[in-house]
Image (spheres, coloured by chain):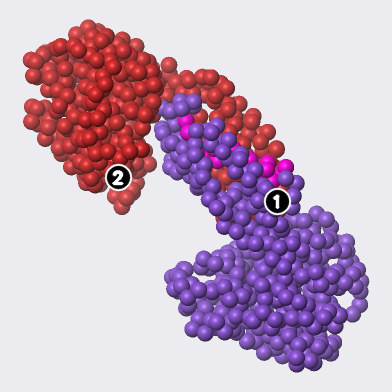
Chain colours: A purple, B red
Amino acid sequence: MTRRSFLGTLALTSVAPRWSAQVRGRRVNIGSLIGRITNVKLYGAERPWAGANRVAYSDADVEARGYVMRLMTAAGVQPRIDAAGNIFGRRPGSDPSLAPILFGSHIDSVPNGGAFDGTLGALAALGVIEDCDFEGIGTRHPLEMVIWAHSEHVAFNRGLAGSRIAAGDVAPSDFDEVWNGMRRADAIRKIGGDPDRITEASIRPGSVHCYLELHVEQGPVLERLDVPIGVVEGIVGVDRHHVSIAGVSRPAGSTPMDERRDALVAASHLTIAVRDAVVRAAAAVTGTVDRLDMEPNAPGMVPGTVRLTIDLRGMSDAPLRAIAADIAGRAAAIATGTGTSITIAEPSRSAPVATTDALREAIERAAASLRLKTAPLASGLPHDAQRIARLAPMGMIFVPSAGGVTHAPDEQTSPMLCSYGADVLLRTVLDVDRSLPDRLGGPAGAEA
Amino acid sequence: MTRRSFLGTLALTSVAPRWSAQVRGRRVNIGSLIGRITNVKLYGAERPWAGANRVAYSDADVEARGYVMRLMTAAGVQPRIDAAGNIFGRRPGSDPSLAPILFGSHIDSVPNGGAFDGTLGALAALGVIEDCDFEGIGTRHPLEMVIWAHSEHVAFNRGLAGSRIAAGDVAPSDFDEVWNGMRRADAIRKIGGDPDRITEASIRPGSVHCYLELHVEQGPVLERLDVPIGVVEGIVGVDRHHVSIAGVSRPAGSTPMDERRDALVAASHLTIAVRDAVVRAAAAVTGTVDRLDMEPNAPGMVPGTVRLTIDLRGMSDAPLRAIAADIAGRAAAIATGTGTSITIAEPSRSAPVATTDALREAIERAAASLRLKTAPLASGLPHDAQRIARLAPMGMIFVPSAGGVTHAPDEQTSPMLCSYGADVLLRTVLDVDRSLPDRLGGPAGAEA
């Protein structure tokens, strides 16, 4: 890929608005938004055109959090850090009996990541509050922005850590875990949290009216559809099947082809079978062999052992299970054919999480008010929103990622598209405040 | 595999001699041979039933070398260490104008290796000289045993180091290489060599009448054929093709199946194609993908890059090149089909080495005198003999490895089979001394 300067990229991709939304009225300040995204990226980035490097709990993460809190303070939004290190900022509503409308995202990044992943939604949330102030818009519900701590799965064992803790998913043993020479308890202190009072970070179900998140798609679907706004149907369930293939390692030169039990040959058939089973099922499922390690992995030796992981993702359980059964059947035949033994462990599962109908409808109305096309799509990656869905109705807005690139320096969403996404978030917040019932109901569904 | 004590293994496998050689006369002392193999294995082995651990230049290697040199001295064979660390021991012949008949093997091992690999041939060489002494047999040629230093490819970058240096394949830069905290020059000093006089270790072509080596097969062929003696036709050529597959790494959950450029799917097709191309060629060739590494090898990410190595081995170049061309054609189709790019670098090549006709015939006569069946076979693994073949006529004798196991604690060759191998070596040496021309000719051929 051509390396271009970060600012050059923004300039180049800001042309050609095919879905031009020439609508006056409530708009998030796009100049501020893009300038702030650019500034956040410079914390930890070696050069302006290098990847984002704000791994959670790093010095760059702490510095970027400080920058965003200064922006909040300047905008009259007092930042509050909870015991988990999540940053909240509230703008009061007119009805003190109503729970806040919560919206935001994260600003930590993967190593050498993209500028927009998380940061777009986090800074658009501030932009929403600023625009309400600028235009003198009052809301019935309090508006509360949030920047979740440690969302990317880089530091420590469990990602989405800030929102996970908010959802009450935390164990005392977590705090003794050491990563990068740092205890988790100290890491949380480093970003202003308080591990000794961690239970205070739990969000009580019902205490939030709803949660909304704007995020880049991190996939190619919206761009391919030529649609600027994705209305997220839910976050896929993930079944990870850990597979162990036992063959026999012998010297390659002295072991005739018909006497081999080559674990890599078996793994190769299985990798192709996974793809074939998923493609044939023609369901909205992805299937990937994403990890593979073999032994002895040595010159002149037939591979004796392969361990690999099959990652299946989809919005509903039935096709995931049907495909897993298909793969298991094929694996048995492959084992027989290759003289190996193939063991597939019970998968680790995270259940699919559906977004709330009423919020999807509000997002559609907001996009329609801006004359922006929408498309429904599932999120194939985890988001903080999936944890918060346990506590409150939840909705997500996606904007396209150029070429589907993410977690890389080349990740791009044009300023125009960022603007559309922020405006849809703003208008959805206002729509929810005015038109939706004061109680949207319980948490979002666990399955579509 | 059942874990049995090392001595127990020897006892259990010493029964059932199907090729019983009830022949009187010249025999290597099998009790001494097995006892010594057992003793050598105890240097560096954590427990009697653990694998051999005498990596070249380790303390255990040095101790085992000391033990063998004491055995040589006790047998009246004065050990001499050359500048490369190879150990020689000569028994004079009656005709001072004749070059020595050289025979031996190595005693260094891979980590957690087998007891017989190398050690059988090295100690059988001593047994041959002892039997000649015991029976008062004089030879016209001097008999010279050799224990090559650093034969296994574990320490430093280039294996077969002692015999390689003897063949003149040594560069000044080799001595600065550091492995395991040790400079190669110091490693050679540690085993009694002298890197400052390394050129003195070169063996002048014509200064050795011939070279013979007894070794375990390290493969399943002889056992499958139910034949105790393999007459080695040559040592295979090895072409190693380094392959780089470039796909595109994207999040698995957000990248639809039909938009993927999955490097592991391409690598899987290629691995199967390698096997298929070799099997279809129906030549005496093996083909193996023996190394594979992929990136990012991370949960939830489509594999973006795979680097793998295709190892092709055979006794003649033509089928190796035809199969490589077949694989290259299939790789191009796989790249197109998977949207990846596949680059196959020019292979690293080691040429096949044929054994000398007259020596194969002498081995056949020796086996026949013991009423032992023989089978011709190629060595699929490198041996010191392939280096020495540059300097002198060369022959190799194989005995079966149970189950084809090698480089593992379970490597086994029964005492009976060890005895047969040693006796064939003894009788071949005597046959060569008496019946073959004083000059067998030049070095062994470079290709069968």
User: Are marks 2 and 1 in one subunit?
Assistant: no
Query: What residue sits 25% from the left and 33% below the top?
Result: B9
Quarter of image, res A369: bottom right
- Please, what secondary structure does the residue beneath circle 1 have? helix
Which label lies toward us, 2 or 1? 1
For the C terminus of chain A, give its image quadrant. bottom right
Q: Residues within 10 Å of mark 1 (few under 14, many from 20)?
A: some
Q: Position of residue A158 (x, y in %)?
A: 54, 67
Is the stretch drawn in magenta largely helix, strand or loop?
helix
Q: Is residue A332 visible?
A: yes
Q: Amino acid at mark 2?
A: Arg
Query: What residue sits 28% from the left and 15% below the top?
Result: B19
Q: Position of residue A445 (x, y in %)?
A: 72, 68
Q: Nearer the viewer, residue A82 or B305?
A: A82
Q: Is residue B176 left or right of residue A383?
A: left
Q: Amino acid at mark 1?
A: Pro
Residue wearing tag 2? B184
Magenta span of residues: A260-280
Query: What residue sits 70% from the left and 37% below the top?
Result: B336
Q: Nearer the viewer, residue B175 or B125?
A: B125
- The circle drawn on residue A319 is 1
Query: What residue sits 87% from the left and 64% below the top?
Result: A373
- The circle drawn on residue B257 is none
- Please, what secondary structure does the residue beneath circle 2 have? helix
Write down the chain letter for disc 2.
Answer: B
Write down the chain letter for disc 1.
Answer: A
Instruction: Specify whether residue A275 is painted magenta.
Output: yes
Instruction: Specify whether residue B440 is painted magenta.
Output: no
Q: Position of residue A381 (x, y in %)?
A: 67, 61
Q: Position of residue B10 (x, y in %)?
A: 23, 31
